[in-house]
Amino acid sequence: MSVAGGIPGSQERLGFEVSRIRGDFPALHQEVYGKPLIYLDNAATTQKPQPVIDAMVRFYTCDCANIHRGVHLLSERATRNYEDSRTRVKRFINAADESEIVFVRGATEGINLVAQSYVRPLLERGDEILISALEHHSNIVPWQILCEEKGARLRVVPMNMRGELLLEEYESLLRPRTRLVSVAHVSNALGTVVPVERMIGMAHRRNIPVLVDGAQAVPHMKADVARLGCDFYVFSGHKVYGPTGVGVLYGKKHLLEAMPPYQGGGDMISSVTFEKTVYNRLPYKFEAGTPNIAGGIALGAAIDYLEAIGLDRIAEYEQDLLRYATEAFSNLPGVRLIGTAAEKAGVLSFVVEGVHPHDVGTILDQEGIAIRTGHHCAQPVMDYFNVPATARASLAFYNTREEIDALAAGIRKVAEVFS
Ligand code: 7TS
């Protein structure tokens, strides 16, 4: 591996020590095709800092045991570390209590859990579930499955050509039969920051509960469930510099209490006979089977890492980088940004005139630049903007202005190759 990550220069902006931060991410310090890796696919998944990797290694090296059951020391240690992580998550999103933090596989599983355990028992023919036009498939398909089964209707809040939701239309879609609003906090395909706080207020005035899909928000801004007032909030560990296979469902305690278990198995019970099972208390009622213990512990390490830098400083740095990149894109001939909302976070979705996004991605890859191309699991967004796919560069706080310059140069090269 050659060291290409610690590019010095103008990135030491805003007192944000990006070259030191880059030093914490081993994967950034490699070459691909003989070029320094420029990793701009952070909305798909983020690279991991050394403390997160260390936490995984430490678990498997020293503390490997199952949790909540052993009397032996290793199991006690593993249990304590896993539950400490839950406390960190609670603090991180400002939940009231650890019992409101359910560890799941990721945002997708969190949404499916709410669909199956909260909405399914109360949904009747003619009821409505309200989502928005900018959702990821994870926040569309679980509701479609339910609506189909129950004869309910999926309603969609429309957006404008900048990728902003239309709040007047939203208000008119909050109806007596609306059983839940489920909306992204930040769009993965457009970068739009959705005004969820306002939308939750509007829904709550009509006693409609709200789930917020925070998969793309938590990496970029302080997500405060108490301030938002949301009823449910989900996010994925791997998008916040933690491991894959672990995520979080936050739910208000009284709602979680009333919900039936999502899956049956070990750990979610308090007693079992062949006649009757008594379920465990929250949050274990929703955590059947051996969980991703190493992942849960390492997610705690990721949160520690983020908090040590500070979400406010991360947001400030990334907003500066986003402005810089947006300006750079405006000088690229034949390039159109898809998603130009007034409030955005970390995503530049774009098309290059006359070039298929996959070709854009392939040529950039040869330059060592990793972006994502395709529909980003948000096909309705692509349909709305009348494009089959986009190329998407998504930012993290370890990215630099120099990397944006390299991206812009790469896109110019794409345009030249195809002209
Ligand atoms: N919700 C949003 C807004 C997302 O962006 C994603 C993943 C998910 C839910 C699902 O997360 P998971 O961890 O459960 O898979 N988004 C992306 C993406 O934009 N590129 O790859 C995955």
Image: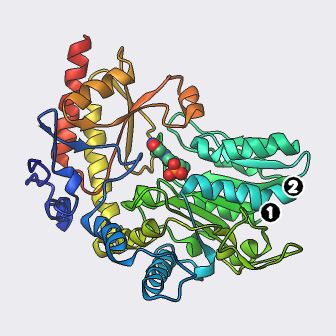
Q: Is residue 74 left or right of residue 151?
A: left
Q: Going from the N terminus, do you reach mark 2 or mark 1 first? A: 2
Q: Is residue 61 left or right of residue 210?
A: left
Kindly state the secondary structure of the residue where label 1 is placed: loop
Q: Position of residue 223 (x, y in %)?
A: 49, 67
Q: Secondary structure at mark 2?
A: loop
Q: Residues within 10 Å of mark 2 (few under 14, many from 20)?
A: few
Q: Nearer the viewer, residue 1 or 223?
A: 1
What residue does disc 1 label? 206
Q: Are marks 2 and 1 in contact (CB under 8 Å)?
A: yes
Residue 330, visible in the rendered structure: yes
Instruction: Residue at 47% x, 86% y: name it.
Output: 76
Q: Give whichever of 225, 321 is nearer the camera.
A: 225
Q: Where does residue 162 sit, x and y in percent of width and height? A: 50, 37
Q: Amino acid at mark 2?
A: Pro
User: From this viewpoint, is residue 341 visible?
Assistant: no
**Spatial distance from mark 2 to mark 1, Cα to Cα?**
8 Å
Are there few (<14), some (14-19), or many (20+) residues within 10 Å of tag 1?
Answer: few
The residue sitting at 11% across, 53% down in the picture is 10
Residue at the (59%, 83%) spot, across then down:
97
Residue 70's disc is: none
Give the amino acid at mark 1: Arg
Considering only vertical position in the picture, is 405 above or below 317? Answer: above
Which residue is disc 2 drawn over?
A: 176
Q: Which quarter of the image is occupied by the C terminus?
A: top left
**Colour logic:** rainbow
